[in-house]
Amino acid sequence: MNLGGVMPPIATPFQNSKLALDKLRGNFQKWNKTGLSGYLVLGSNGEAVYLNEKEKIKVVEASRESIPGSKTMLVGTGMESTQETIRFTNQVAKMGADCALVVTPSYFKGSMKPQVLYEHFISVADSARMGILVYNVPQYTGINLEPEWVARLSEHPNIIGIKDSSGNIGQLSDIISLSRKGFSVFVGSAPVFFPALCVGAVGGILAVANVTPEECVHIQTLFNQKRLDEAKTMQNQLTPLAKAVTTKHGIPGLKMAMDLAGYFGGAPRLPLKRHGEGVERELRDLLVQLQ
Amino acid sequence: MNLGGVMPPIATPFQNSKLALDKLRGNFQKWNKTGLSGYLVLGSNGEAVYLNEKEKIKVVEASRESIPGSKTMLVGTGMESTQETIRFTNQVAKMGADCALVVTPSYFKGSMKPQVLYEHFISVADSARMGILVYNVPQYTGINLEPEWVARLSEHPNIIGIKDSSGNIGQLSDIISLSRKGFSVFVGSAPVFFPALCVGAVGGILAVANVTPEECVHIQTLFNQKRLDEAKTMQNQLTPLAKAVTTKHGIPGLKMAMDLAGYFGGAPRLPLKRHGEGVERELRDLLVQLQ
Amino acid sequence: MNLGGVMPPIATPFQNSKLALDKLRGNFQKWNKTGLSGYLVLGSNGEAVYLNEKEKIKVVEASRESIPGSKTMLVGTGMESTQETIRFTNQVAKMGADCALVVTPSYFKGSMKPQVLYEHFISVADSARMGILVYNVPQYTGINLEPEWVARLSEHPNIIGIKDSSGNIGQLSDIISLSRKGFSVFVGSAPVFFPALCVGAVGGILAVANVTPEECVHIQTLFNQKRLDEAKTMQNQLTPLAKAVTTKHGIPGLKMAMDLAGYFGGAPRLPLKRHGEGVERELRDLLVQLQ
Amino acid sequence: MNLGGVMPPIATPFQNSKLALDKLRGNFQKWNKTGLSGYLVLGSNGEAVYLNEKEKIKVVEASRESIPGSKTMLVGTGMESTQETIRFTNQVAKMGADCALVVTPSYFKGSMKPQVLYEHFISVADSARMGILVYNVPQYTGINLEPEWVARLSEHPNIIGIKDSSGNIGQLSDIISLSRKGFSVFVGSAPVFFPALCVGAVGGILAVANVTPEECVHIQTLFNQKRLDEAKTMQNQLTPLAKAVTTKHGIPGLKMAMDLAGYFGGAPRLPLKRHGEGVERELRDLLVQLQ
């Protein structure tokens, strides 16, 4: 498998707080026409923590039907328990996903020493019937996987890459330089997409790509053409919106921006709540400035 | 309900990584003979994050059968989603639990503003068919609920108390002084049990009480008798073991100490692993020093 | 020397940003009539970091003249460099101070390993011509000295105590229980003065004691008389003001509260600035509530 | 003034813990033959916090004599107090420095709100008789100056640039994109020198440039020639040494590496101490690998 490019961690649409799979299919129809290289299903931005397992299965099924074979289907399958992670990963593999994104377990932070995390990923990789990518997202988990340990994991034939959302370019650079050749390193933070490409990332798994996929793809295209100044300028234009739909306004902001950009966003699940008019105006302004 | 005293957040026994409910019943037989005032089922130390829902139900059932009416049965029911928390809380209420412990949702840390958390707890309390206690455990969740907001929550007739595991005695003191009279404030950190009693806590929900329940109860008894120096001395004797079975060696340490003290501890679920001989020696020494 | 009781880290008065020693003498006249057991000169709250060495000497001289022999004169003498700390400590000793408070050096945080800090304090203690107290104040220095290391330092005959301003009662309790008998442990955080006394602190070095010395002393008196509930109530009454003049409004808040309480506070040095009317009203209200 | 390129924050040589200015002159003779664009005197790595003011003056004098007019002489002049910072900055200006590096005051962290820091820098810039650069180094100060505030400061005609040592490339990118054109943004963290150049930094003030100036300069030369892959490779080769002489082994490591590379490093001042043979071997290996 040749991974790379821009993938959105797709939002999960709800209506009256119930899954709205038709809305999800509608979003895919539009996304499929863009230069996105694939999709992350059941990622953090997919509100996976608010879905029970039946709902997760339905989202995977609907996504599998909507994602063409030419695009990667990556699914978030990580749980706290090793055996549950293996079980769910293989269930998703059977449903036709291409690869799985496995987050670092994190609840018992003090016990999640590097060696414990290492063995967790090795166990999952040994048993998984598809390739897995490690998911490092310290801002949610409070756990950071050091580059030396990622490099060790990269030696496993079934651990094919990583999504690093730390936003730390020095760390990303170390991961790339220490891991085996061919290990696919994705950045998970849109405001540093351009510098991530400079240090050798193969692509980005970016929340804002739910909203403005073409702009994200364009940064990588410009970079590949060595048009660095233009890529940097495009990045600077994208950054304010990228921050607004993540750190600043969270998933409610992401979904609102999707609505404004012609996708279905809708309301998140409680305890998250739709933002008010002030945020809507701010997001609309940011979208206008991008055009 | 008149809450107070010492409760262990009970460990969940596994054999070959399967639930071992007979071992749980055996533990209850011994604990029931002590001065423990009740039990927290499905708490952090119960490895609730490693149990699927069927397993959780079984643990609640077995606990309900084993806990006498004279002791409080508190069950951890908090989830990330508000509606799932309500659903599970009421399922547990139907099974005969006395009250529920609801952790702060925390995955989307940036979005979990005080007002969002406040509304989550109010929604759960409005719909729950039993009293709830708020669970504040920043070392696991990365979220801290400030005393001012706890005080506001304490005004709700169905929010009957809090377990604060921050270990911050200043904060505990503020919670007690700002909340309504009769609101039950438990400390969730054994090394500060004695000072927590001094500032007005009604009791402690303490991991080490799985191992040495009588010693924990004795601290509170001495305090109630105004024998402060003896209570302080007892605390100082307990503290090294209390740290060893939490921050230092985690749940694997807790379970190993239970084995050494005559309870069934056994192995935790992966990715957690049983500790080796070095830790066993350390724990045995700490237990010996307590006698 | 028998240390204990309540000492204020005295504020340094300025007029037109010049030292106002007459105002300092005026403050001492009032403080000397209270039950304060001594004074910390050139502490953090004395804006020592804004004084050059000539000014520091003048403040020490004026304080020496104003402090009666019956009260302890403790002077902050810690610097980043070991040799400068020794030099200044001995200069202050010659001027008649009773003992010195030596802060953990902290600029090169990554290099300030426990062993490095340990050797720094041992070197200073070996050469100092008066007893020294260790000053642990992680909120300013970013460095925390663990109880095990404090215990080792307490074995040195010339290291006579510690001011721990971490606000962490568990840590304070460990320091007291691990250090040699007779080692004087002061708490440096007024909102936890009462629980600090419960776990065995000999006294408090408290910013708010600049403003309301008698109330602080009264907490300790009540505690010594085993009137715990009254001591706790007094603490709860003091806490809001204690926070306002430290974490909430900083040194400008402390000085403003001193003005309102009949002492000379005046303006701090730039970049600190006097607060406006809103804070003044808030502080006045807090003072009124205390009476 | 046209700032840019690579500058080392020069180490201050001691012999028997006394200033060794002849050794400093010897170092300058070698550095002056390289492509370094200038020098930072009295930076963090110059152990400025361990020098008294007389010593600082001597170091500035010796540096002024050794630095040719073609290279920038930047001097660290920031202190906690605004008025002392102005006084010392102008003293240094009179001695012929080109510009001053002014660190964020930080002792009273809670009070150092953005507006307070802003006014501090504006006051210094208003009164300084040379241009100033802001110094943002959160790992030492515990304070971070947000890009929005740097942008506001960049509007002042006498605030000509910034050294940002956060290591955060997203932040560096924001500073560059938000500040006025011509504002000189230096990165202060060698492991991210290459990505910093990609996002538009004019150069780097890099500890490791004390040891291997040519390698640092070479990265920028390759970058300017659009030879991105070679620049990235050079960066990856430099990174392990760059980390060893900063975060990993601190100033003692930096000075030891200087000795190994043919400069005078010598011992740091206490409480810092020379490392042992293990570190020496590690540093020698890293230097060998670079050739």
Image: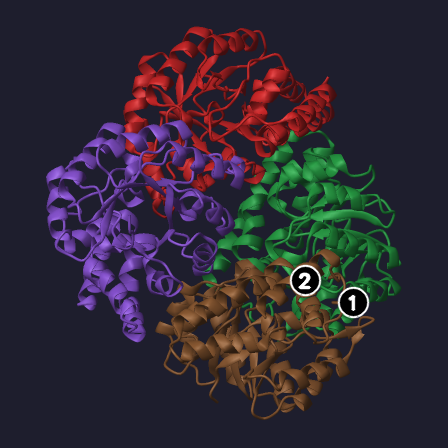
Chain colours: A red, B purple, C brown, D green
Estimate the spatial distance between the alpha carbons at disc 1 and disc 2, rounded to whole Å. 20 Å
Q: How many marks?
A: 2
Q: Quadrant of residue D12?
A: bottom right
Q: Quadrant of residue D76?
A: bottom right
With B83 as the anchor, is D241 left or right in this view?
A: right
User: Compared with residue C273, is residue A26 higher up or lower down, i.e. above or below?
Assistant: above
Q: Which residue is mark 1?
A: D84
In front of the other: A282 or D238: A282
Give the number of the disc on residue D176.
none
Mark 2 crowdedness (10 Å alpha carbons): few <14, some 14-19, many ≥20? many
Q: Kindly identify the residue that appears in the image at 42 percent across and 25 percent down.
A: A48
In front of the other: B121 or D72: B121
Percent x, y for residue D284? Answer: 52, 54
Q: Amino acid type of disc 2?
A: Gly
Quarter occupied by the N terminus of chain A: top left
Q: Kindly identify the residue that appears in the image at 36 percent across and 31 percent down.
A: B85
Asked if residue B109 shows in the view, the reply is: yes
Q: Quadrant of residue A126?
A: top left
Work out whether mark 1 precedes mark 2 in sequence or the reverse, and give the earlier one: 2
Q: Amino acid type of disc 1?
A: Glu
Quarter occupied by the C terminus of chain A: top right
Q: Regarding mark 1 in the picture, which secondary structure is present there? A: helix
Q: Kindly identify the residue that appears in the image at 39 percent across and 68 percent down.
A: C173
Percent x, y for residue A221? Answer: 64, 17
In front of the other: B33 or D209: B33
Percent x, y for residue A144? Answer: 46, 41
**Which mark lies nearer to you, 1 or 2?**
1
Q: Which residue is mark 2?
A: D46
